[in-house]
Amino acid sequence: MPEGYLPILVMLLVTGAFATIALVVSAVLGPKRSNPAKDEAYESGILPFGDARRRFPVQFYVIAVLFILFDVEVILMYPWAVSARKLGVFGLIEMAIFLGILLVGFVYAWKNDAFKWQ
């Protein structure tokens, strides 16, 4: 294993150990009895009435997925922008292909009225 990966391995082991210890301590020291009053939903001092599980229009999910798609696009463009000079023409062509694929998806969403709110 190259020495450059050793700090990452140590970090993963320490965080994994910390998470495991926290879960074990919580299970051992945490309360064992359930109380119906404590399990009831409570918000803003008002007791709940009715069912909180309502259906959301699909449009919310479509907008959320499109946001994640284009947010990931921007996240992937930052490292490219930093190292664009080092990558040269190959990096430029690679990013153009990446943006072209995303542009096809954007045009498809636009043509199917994914951005229109009804």
Image (cartoon, grey):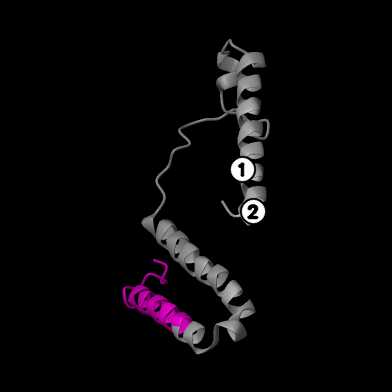
Q: Which mark is residue 107?
A: none
Q: Quadrant of residue 19?
A: top right
Percent position of residue 56, x then y: 42, 50
**Dividing the image into 4 quarters, which one contains the C terminus?**
bottom left
Q: Magenta residues?
A: 94-118
Q: Is residue 23 left or right of residue 104?
A: right
Q: Quadrant of residue 110?
A: bottom left
Rendered residue at 49%/65% (across/down)? 67
Answer whether residue 106 is magenta in the image: yes
Q: Main secondary structure of the magenta part?
A: helix
- Closer to viewer: mark 2 or mark 1: 2
Q: Amino acid at mark 2?
A: Glu
Q: Earlier in the sequence, mark 2 or mark 1?
A: 2
The furthest residue to the top: 33
Q: Quadrant of residue 48?
A: top right
Q: Please name whichever residue, 42 or 17, is drawn nearer the observer in this view of the structure.
A: 17
Figure check: 67 above or below 52:
below
Judged from the image, the secondary structure of the residue bearing numbered disc 1 is helix
Judged from the image, the secondary structure of the residue bearing numbered disc 2 is helix
Q: Amino acid at mark 1?
A: Leu
Figure check: 38 above or below 80:
above
Label 2, on which residue?
3
Q: Please name whichever residue, 39 or 98, is drawn nearer the observer in this view of the structure.
A: 98
Rendered residue at 59%/11% (across/down)? 32
Q: Is residue 30 left or right of residue 64?
A: right
Label 1, on which residue?
12
Rendered residue at 62%/38% (across/down)? 13
Q: Dot 2 surroundings within 10 Å: few (below 14), some, or many (20 or more)?
A: few
Give the alpha-carbon distance from disc 2 to disc 1, as whole Å: 15 Å
Q: Please name whichever residue, 16 or 25, is drawn nearer the observer in this view of the structure.
A: 16
Percent position of residue 26, x then y: 64, 21
